[in-house]
Image (cartoon, rainbow, N blue to C red):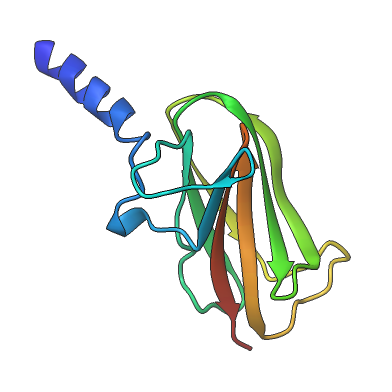
Amino acid sequence: MKYLNVFIVMAALSLFPSCESDTKILAGYQNGEELEEGDLIPFLLHQNFPNPFNPRTSIRFDVGKSLHLTMKVYTDDWQEVSKLVDDEFDENTFHTVIFQGINSDGEEVPSGSYFYTLEGGGVILIRKMTVLK
């Protein structure tokens, strides 16, 4: 039982990592200030897989503390394409969202580069993905 508690603590701490090489993001901001290497953040946004993709891709995110999160997809000139997430999430949870390559009007998005963001608690993380048709 002692070792189980240690594992749980280590797993919880791993949800608050610094921005290490395997967790690099395209950009990240906290309360309007750009995040720097070593800053602790309340959630992680992973690179979508597969990337590039057609017709759909998975986007994983890990939540370290309970908060409201919003995930959106944007064109490369920052026009909103779709809102994928707008909900409350419990602490120490892992989630996967499937982006079907469909915009808010139900139309397929064309090939190209897109950005996706995850925002909550004053933090916004940004990654890039590519649709190939």
Give the camera-side residue of 22 and 87. Answer: 22
In the picture, residue 107 is in which quadrant? bottom right
Please give left or right for residue 66 compared with residue 85 in the image: left
Image: 79 above or below 45: below
Give the camera-side residue of 28 and 10. Answer: 28
> What quarter of the picture does the N terminus occupy?
top left
Where does the image place residue 124, in percent across and percent down from the top left? Answer: 60, 46
Where does the image place residue 81, in percent across and percent down from the top left? Answer: 78, 65
Image: 55 above or below 126: below
Where does the image place residue 86, in percent across and percent down from the top left? Answer: 72, 40
In the picture, residue 54 is in which quadrant? bottom right
Please give left or right for residue 49 compared with residue 9 in the image: right
Where does the image place residue 21, in percent across and percent down from the top left? Answer: 29, 58
The total of numbered circles placed on residues is 0
Which residue is outermost to the right? 105
Residue at point 46%, 58% (across, down) = 25
Which residue is outermost to the bottom? 133
Residue at point 65%, 84% (across, down) = 112
